[in-house]
Amino acid sequence: MLNKDQKRGLTIALRIMEETIQYIEQVFNNGDYSGILYDVKCSLDEGVTREILKRALLIKDKIKTLSKRFDLENELRDPAREILGKLSSSWCILEDVKAIKLKRYGAVADELEDVLDPHLNGIIDLILDIERLLLEKPS
């Protein structure tokens, strides 16, 4: 009923929807998060949350029905690849907030490089360690 390209397009759209539902379930089921630089607090009423989760299950059921009906391919994902991508992006972002780069936002204190950059470099070194460990992982 679907040609190869149509099947791929449908698969991608439904995967994105499934990822969105998984995120919704994760947020509502894990509750609040208190971090260092940000907090997550769901302000929705518990009844509303419950209703949203019910509908999320219905969406997943419909995705499953379509997947079976059109024999859509299940993709095996290795979270290590996604983690590597996020760490690489984070590394670039950290490089862009070193003292010399902050000059684009205005004058930078003379001592900022000595105070800020060593901490950023330490985080970057740890990122590189994590990346190395992920790349060395046994398959």
Image (cartoon, rainbow, N blue to C red):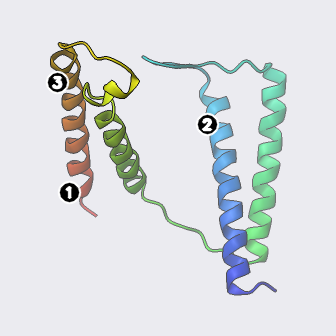
Quarter occupied by residue 61? bottom right
Helix, strand or loop at label 1? It is helix
How far apart in space, not on screen, are marks 1 and 3 (Cα)? 27 Å
Residue 23 point in image, percent of width and height: 63, 41
In the rendered image, the residue lying farthest to the front is 107
Residue at image coords 35%, 44%: 87
Disc number lying in front (1 or 3): 3
Residue 133 point in image, percent of width and height: 22, 49
Residue type at mark 2 is Gln
Disc number lying in front (3 or 2): 3
Reply above or below: 124 against 59.
above
Q: How many tags in the picture?
A: 3
Residue type at mark 1 is Glu
- Mark 1 or 2, nearer chain start: 2
Residue 104 point in image, percent of width and height: 37, 28
Q: Which residue is mark 3?
A: 118
Left/right placement of residue 38 relative to residue 59 reads left
Q: Which residue is mark 2?
A: 26
Within-10-Å neighbours for mark 3: few <14, some 14–19, many 20+: few
Q: Which residue is mark 1?
A: 136
**Residue 71 visible in rendering:** no
Within-10-Å neighbours for mark 1: few <14, some 14–19, many 20+: few
Reply above or below: 8 against 92.
below
Quarter occupied by residue 113? top left
Helix, strand or loop at label 2? It is helix
Left/right placement of residue 111 relative to residue 108 reads left
Residue type at mark 3 is Pro
**Residue 95 visible in rendering:** yes
